[in-house]
Image: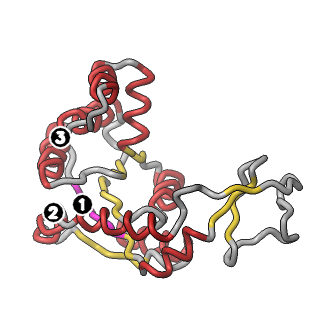
Amino acid sequence: MNIILLGPPGAGKGTQSAGLVERHGMRQLSTGDMLRAAVKAETPVGLEAKAVMDRGELVSDAIVSALIDDNLAAMDAQTGAIFDGYPRTAAQADDLDRILARHGRSLDHVIELEVDVDALVERITGRFSCANCGALYHDTANPPAKPGVCDTCGSTEFKRRPDDNEETVRTRMEEYRAKTAPILPGYEARGIVTRVDGMASIDDVAGAIDAILA
């Protein structure tokens, strides 16, 4: 099973990908993670990407697609793939079809986690974590049992990500819509796009995804 998991930042793609890895033995192919790993390992693609980034330029579609190709080649043929952050453009979508075919695979599902923008703003801007142990909290959904004290380690120091603010969240949402708009029509024409309520509970979202993959 090979799927693309779509959704704006904060929609829960990372959480749901981790669940799919655990429940189904799939592998999450995140372009950011793969890029960092390739650069660190100094693979041919990693060295090429590093040279581009050192010049302050954006990594090209060809380099990103080569990363996908390399990672699929290293995977067991029976292991399903979750594509996270790829494809972002129509050209990358075409590349993915060719790469999958080369490895005897095909794309089974494109699953989009739909969100309400205002609710997503509340979800993201309310996030904070323990500065000591990293435990995650939320102002309304998951506050510490004792205000100002970490449930896990007892620390009283907390932090918020500087980009977890309303303006940034709304900008990310617009960027996501702009990037996904070119790739969805082709997949919809193939009848492989399904949308899931990303604002539901983690377990309910996981159940909906499992039902799609069944």
Q: Mark 1 near mark 2, Cβ–Cβ under 8 Å? A: yes
Q: Which mark is residue 179?
A: 1
The residue at the point 51 percent across, 54 percent down is: 18
Give the Cα separation between the discs numbered 3 and 2.
19 Å
- Looking at the figure, which quarter contains the N terminus? bottom left
Which SS class for mark 2? loop
Q: Residues within 10 Å of mark 2 (few under 14, many from 20)?
A: some
Query: Is residue 53 on the magenta stretch?
Result: no
The residue at the point 36 percent across, 52 percent down is: 84
Q: Which residues are magenta?
A: 107-112
Q: Which mark is residue 182?
A: 2
Which SS class for mark 1? helix
Query: Is residue 110 on the magenta stretch?
Result: yes
**Of marks 3 and 1, which one's residue comes earlier in the chain?**
3
Image side of residue 65 versus residue 94, left or right: right
Type of residue at label 2? Pro
**Front in this rendered view, residue 7 or 73:** 7
Q: Position of residue 136 (x, y in %)?
A: 69, 59
- Depicted 125 relative to depicted 31: above or below: below
Q: Position of residue 188 (x, y in %)?
A: 16, 71
* Mark whose residue sits in front, 3 or 2: 2
The residue at the point 42 percent across, 78 percent down is: 117
- Depicted 65 relative to depicted 145: above or below: above
Image side of residue 155 versus residue 27, left or right: right
- Depicted 50 relative to depicted 158: above or below: above
Give the Cα separation between the discs numbered 1 and 2.
7 Å
Q: Which mark is residue 99?
A: 3
Q: Residues within 10 Å of mark 3 (few under 14, many from 20)?
A: many
**Front in this rendered view, residue 56 or 131:** 56
- Main SS, magenta region, reads strand
